[in-house]
Image (cartoon, grey):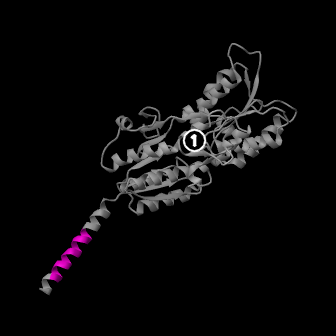
């Protein structure tokens, strides 16, 4: 009898181990590589992605690479070595991951380019982002509408300066070109003037989207072209981290007595405070929680062996488009899911509260992130 019991106990142990191994095998692991923690938005992206995937039952390995290209390659290589089932990567430099992703391909690990397109590799299966060109268009159109620009009326002119983003970030060119293409007719007509003459992306780019670099560049521009009292009407900044530096330069170094229009993008807390305080005029908001939702649903289908297409969006309460024409990474068009951004000013900050990701502070004066208060 004891022998029978021992056999049964052994059998139960074997079955338990098998069940555990099977359960473990069925739990997929997602590797997420974010570029840096130094910009507020990437902390939000990483948080929302990890939260969405873990709630859906996936294991998550999340890394941040401190804006260090070598570190990101090492981070991704480690995720590959760990045997993750899917890679979601927001690249520091879209050109720098080609060899590392070849290793992902060899390991059979699919790749989603998140928010920033990864260039010159056919390993990328999909791209999830916002309509980046439209971000720039919204900024440019805001300037047109706010100043009341009219190509038929050249009686009044305005001065504008541009601050673009990181040359290593593929999105930065889309942001800048969307704004420049929108405003160029007014520049050509002499309605908008650029006293510095800096109208090319390379002339106004800001490596790493650095606030300090944007501050220094704008200080130099103000000293060189505006110290005699020349009026600056618009400082068009491609994102909020650069807008933060530009607004600081205007506060400390601008000789004029007007408050220039200052654009931005992302909805960072410090910039929303600047909007309330009148130091920044607008930001283009991108709901990264929705971006995480689209990425999750896309990943579910991929991990199940499917090939998602436009119909994926039919089941989501997210405003987005499926694009198979716009984003060529050098090896071909990457199928893209592009979410829709929108303009935030001091007049519609409650739209951010409606997302559930922000709330008013105790004094009902500034917005704070709900993630910081839970």
The magenta stretch is 5-18
**Residue 199: image x %, image y %?**
69, 31
Residue at position x 53%, y 41% in the image: 355
Which sits in the foreground, 206 or 130?
Answer: 130
Relative placement, left or right, of 328 versus 343 is: left
**Residue 6 forms part of the magenta stretch:** yes
Quarter-wise, where is residue 221 in the image?
top right
Q: Quadrant of the C terminus?
A: bottom right
Residue 100 placement (x, y as % from top left): 46, 55
Up-down relation of residue 152 to residue 171 (above or below)? above
Which quadrant is the N terminus positioned in?
bottom left
| Residue 86 belongs to magenta span | no
Q: Residue at x 73, y 40 (%)?
A: 277
**Above or below — where is 196 with respect to 92?**
above
Quarter of the figure with residue 293:
top left
Q: Is residue 98 visible?
A: no
Q: Quick one: which residue is furthest to the bottom in this view?
A: 2
On the image, numbered disc 1 is attached to which residue? 353
Q: For residue 135, what is the image quadrant? A: top right
């Amino acid at each position: 009898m004891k022998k029978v019991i021992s056999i049964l106990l052994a059998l139960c142990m074997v079955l338990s181990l098998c069940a555990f191994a099977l359960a473990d095998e069925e739990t997929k692991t997602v590797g997420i590589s974010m570029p840096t923690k130094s910009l507020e938005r990437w902390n939000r992206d990483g948080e929302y992605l990890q939260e969405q995937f873990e709630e859906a039952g996936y294991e998550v390995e999340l890394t941040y690479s401190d804006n260090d290209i070598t570190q990101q390659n090492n981070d991704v290589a480690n995720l590959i070595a760990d045997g993750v089932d899917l890679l979601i990567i927001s690249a520091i430099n879209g050109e720098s991951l080609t060899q590392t992703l070849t290793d992902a391909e060899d390991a059979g690990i699919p790749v989603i380019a998140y928010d920033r397109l990864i260039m010159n590799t056919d390993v990328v299966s999909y791209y999830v982002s916002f309509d980046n060109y439209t971000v720039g268009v919204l900024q440019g159109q805001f300037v047109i509408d706010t100043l009341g620009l009219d190509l038929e009326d050249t009686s009044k002119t305005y001065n504008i300066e541009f601050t673009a983003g990181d040359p290593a970030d593929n999105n930065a060119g889309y942001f800048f070109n969307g704004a420049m293409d929108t405003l160029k007719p007014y520049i050509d007509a002499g309605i908008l003037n650029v006293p510095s003459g800096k109208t090319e992306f390379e002339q106004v780019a800001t490596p790493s989207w650095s606030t300090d670099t944007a501050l220094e560049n704008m200080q130099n521009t103000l000293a060189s072209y505006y110290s005699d009292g020349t009026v600056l009407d618009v400082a068009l900044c491609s994102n909020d981290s650069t807008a933060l530096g530009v607004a600081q330069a205007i506060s400390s170094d601008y000789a004029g007595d007007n408050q220039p229009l200052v654009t931005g993008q992302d909805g960072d807390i410090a910039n929303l405070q600047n909007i309330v305080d009148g130091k920044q005029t607008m930001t283009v908001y991108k709901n990264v929680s929705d971006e995480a939702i689209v990425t999750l649903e896309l990943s579910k289908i991929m991990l199940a062996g499917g090939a998602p297409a436009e119909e994926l969006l039919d089941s989501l309460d997210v405003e987005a488009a499926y694009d198979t024409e716009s984003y060529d990474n050098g090896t071909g068009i990457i199928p893209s899911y592009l979410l829709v951004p929108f303009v935030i000013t001091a007049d519609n900050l409650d739209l951010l509260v409606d997302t559930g990701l922000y709330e008013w502070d105790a004094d009902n004066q500034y917005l704070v992130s709900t993630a910081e208060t839970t």
